[in-house]
Image (cartoon, helix red, strand yellow):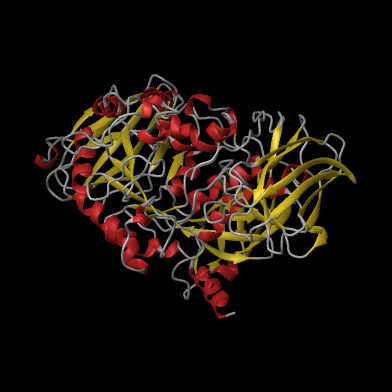
């Protein structure tokens, strides 16, 4: 279920400018509305796991499907260099034979010859389209083939020369935002959430995140005087708080950071009880960075980079290993490092040769004050066909705990092969089993469900012992994928809270392995929407890129402490969509200090002014508005606040009540309007 995507955008973020380097345009940006002949339409798969096209040879998550006979004309602007795809007959269409062609400005550029249903080899397409303004893709059945034969253009893409993009690309339609986050200030700033959840007697590991000019002196007050805290130790040199607390309760500690520029203080409350993950997880996961090539060395490098880049100083703490850490004998011919037994003689799940000592790796991560995550499946196999945890849940949970892991991503893959029952009970059962197994261990392990939002997992995820759950299919670095994931969050805001988080998948910013370690295909504006909306809905912030290849723009996106504060707000109430038009939306959430976070989300590719009717939303009198990305106050507003928002961007603001500012008496929660929108749509 994984695939390699094309190379992507490179830009110079310090100036807000961007430079193209053979940027392949994904099919989602093709204008396929002009049908030249035939009945039906072109279908496009670009969003996520929910839609894919198949031939006898393979599945395609990205690409186009069209009927035969059919032809569609696509404007490409004359600046493209090559068109590439992998063609085959739709596996789920009628049996038959077809001929597919690529025509440029009326001239035939390429023809497939006859290709048939059931062929196990697809036809590769690579066509020189320099100077071509309109590209026509056609599919015609061979004589004797009936109607219903379909053609798949897998991974259809255009490559453009430096500085050139498709006519429909948002970069042509609207200005792009550069770096907005101010430079990290020299004066100390204590970052991170204000709460830390742990179960009684379980290990505590917390690296105090602090920014400011070095050297910094960091201290904790409140550790002495209470016998309950006698097992807590703070190492000022490493900034690591460790130990355990046996007695349930709330234990406030004061963090003090000092340097030559000044001083900052923050209260951290350790809440000892049955709820953990009191704010969404922040950290890094290996899949988008390395896919099936993850290794001990790369994970250690990621841990090093999380600290050296300064990300850990902004609160990122998890280093999570995704699939392919285990043996996969059936892949051993192509990759000998995966050769070996699925489990040892005692039934313990076996790591592959890339991970010679999992306990030592976790100890390395912990020594930096970071937490470690691991991956498995409730089925007999993981997505990559390694051993899953089916019928080994207790054993695997103990193994993960013995190794020292703090987080488990449990991926649905191949559980369909052994699942029983129907509906929500079928979906819940395997996670209930693993949730109980983790609960039996002597350390806290966050359980992250990955079953793509089936059976409204948000409504029951917490009841199987999970702390977060995927609400979407796999999200890729395309606008349709990110925007589709945002759309899926509209009816889910009521399920979030401390220890319970909707997870619309990992962050697709920075250099990713799909693009041969070139930066994300998302335009700068789209990346601002990506991070802003994840923060608004209180999603886990799990970085997916290679941390050793961070550029200034990506670092600025990930280290804006005011954006992170919204995501990590202790109230834990994710945003709902409280107002919308044809091509814009306003999302908002209440924050613990009485302020409100709001995102003015431009769904259009062109810049437009979005007006937030504060009075209609229930905000009375005057409110101070702060531009969160720029970290500067915009002014004091009453009634309406409006801003010009570039195409595909989100203007993220924080509204704080002035002396008279308050919510209208009939408004309990700023998200009340989101309920009304949902009800109105359901009644249509």
The structure residue drawn at horizontal position 66% and vertical position 34%, both measured from the top left corner, is: 9
- 605 or 424: nearer the eye? 424
Can residue 153 be seen here? The reply is no
Left or right: residue 282 compared with residue 604 = left
Spot occupied by residue 213 in the image (x, y as percentages of width and height): 44, 23
Most extreme residue toward the front, as rendered?
144
Name of the residue lying farthest toward the bottom = 683
Does residue 113 lie above or below 666 as drawn? above
- Report the residue that reaches farthest toward the top: 215
Q: Is residue 408 above or below residue 275?
A: above
Residue 591 seen from this side:
yes
Residue 307 pos. (x, y %): 40, 26
Locate residue 230: give its quadrant: top left
x and y percentages locating residue 303 in the rendered image: 38, 27
Q: Return the residue nearer the eye: 408 or 527.
A: 408
Considering the image in quadrants, where does the C terminus appear?
Answer: bottom right
From the viewer's perspective, tell me whether residue 110 is left or right of residue 422.
Answer: right
**Which quarter of the figure has residue 525?**
top right
Name the residue nearer the viewer: 77 or 67. Answer: 67
């Amino acid at each position: 279920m994984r695939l390699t995507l094309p190379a992507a955008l490179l830009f110079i973020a310090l100036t807000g400018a961007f430079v193209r380097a053979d940027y392949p345009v994904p099919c989602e940006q093709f204008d396929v509305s002009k049908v030249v002949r035939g009945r039906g339409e072109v279908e496009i798969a670009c969003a996520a796991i929910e839609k894919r096209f198949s031939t006898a040879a393979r599945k395609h998550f990205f690409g186009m499907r069209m009927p035969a006979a059919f032809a569609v004309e696509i404007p490409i602007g004359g600046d493209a260099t090559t068109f590439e795809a992998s063609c085959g007959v739709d596996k789920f269409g009628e049996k038959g034979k077809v001929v597919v062609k690529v025509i440029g400005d009326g001239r035939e550029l390429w023809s497939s010859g006859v290709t048939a249903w059931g062929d196990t080899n697809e036809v590769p397409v690579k066509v020189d389209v320099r100077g071509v303004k309109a590209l026509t893709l056609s599919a015609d059945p061979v004589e004797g083939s009936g109607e219903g034969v379909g053609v798949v253009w897998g991974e259809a893409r255009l490559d453009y020369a430096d500085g050139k993009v498709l006519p429909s690309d948002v970069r042509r339609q609207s200005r792009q935002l550069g770096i907005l986050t101010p430079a990290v200030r020299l004066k100390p700033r204590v970052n991170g959430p204000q709460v830390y959840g742990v179960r009684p007697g379980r290990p505590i590991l917390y690296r105090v995140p602090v920014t400011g000019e070095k050297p910094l002196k960091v201290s904790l007050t409140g550790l002495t005087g209470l016998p309950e805290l006698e097992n807590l130790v703070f190492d000022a040199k490493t900034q690591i708080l460790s130990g355990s607390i046996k007695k349930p309760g709330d234990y406030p500690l004061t963090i003090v950071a000092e340097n030559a520029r000044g001083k900052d203080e923050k209260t951290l409350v350790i809440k000892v009880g049955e709820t953990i993950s009191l704010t969404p997880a922040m950290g890094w996961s290996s899949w988008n960075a390395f896919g099936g090539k993850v290794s001990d060395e790369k994970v250690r490098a990621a841990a090093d980079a999380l600290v050296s880049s300064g990300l850990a100083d902004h609160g990122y703490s998890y280093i999570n290993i995704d699939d392919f850490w285990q043996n996969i004998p059936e892949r051993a011919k192509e990759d000998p490092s995966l050769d070996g037994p699925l489990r040892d003689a005692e039934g313990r799940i076996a790591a592959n040769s890339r991970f010679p000592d999992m306990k030592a790796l976790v100890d390395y991560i912990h020594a930096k004050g970071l937490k470690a995550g691991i991956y498995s499946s409730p089925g007999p196999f993981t997505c990559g066909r390694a051993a899953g945890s089916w019928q080994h849940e207790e054993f695997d949970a103990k193994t993960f705990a013995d190794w020292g892991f703090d987080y488990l991503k449990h991926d649905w893959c191949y559980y369909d092969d052994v699942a029983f029952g129907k509906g929500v009970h079928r979906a819940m059962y395997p996670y209930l089993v693993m949730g109980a197994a983790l609960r039996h261990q002597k350390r806290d392990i966050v359980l992250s469900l990955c079953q793509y939002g089936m059976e409204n997992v948000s409504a029951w995820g917490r009841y199987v012992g999970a702390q977060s759950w995927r609400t979407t299919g796999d999200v890729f670095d395309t606008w349709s994928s990110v925007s589709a994931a945002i759309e899926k969050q509209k009816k889910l805001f009521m399920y979030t809270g401390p220890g319970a988080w909707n997870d619309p998948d990992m962050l697709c910013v920075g250099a990713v392995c799909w693009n041969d370690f070139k930066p994300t295909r998302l335009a700068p504006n789209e990346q601002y929407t990506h991070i802003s909306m994840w923060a608004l809905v209180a999603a886990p912030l799990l970085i997916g890129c290679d941390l050793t290849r961070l550029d200034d723009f990506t670092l600025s996106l990930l280290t804006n402490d005011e954006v992170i504060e919204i995501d990590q707000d202790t109230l834990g109430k994710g945003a709902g969509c409280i107002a919308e038009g044809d091509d814009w939306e306003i999302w908002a959430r209440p924050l613990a200090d009485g302020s409100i976070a709001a995102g003015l989300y431009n769904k259009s590719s062109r810049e437009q002014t979005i007006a937030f009717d504060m009075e209609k939303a229930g905000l009375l009198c005057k409110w101070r508005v702060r531009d969160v990305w720029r970290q500067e106050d915009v002014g004091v507003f009453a009634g309406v606040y409006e801003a010009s928002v570039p195409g595909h961007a989100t203007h993220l603001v924080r509204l704080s009540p002035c002396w008279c500012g308050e919510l209208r008496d009939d408004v309990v929660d700023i998200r009340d309007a989101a309920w009304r929108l949902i009800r109105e749509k359901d009644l249509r």
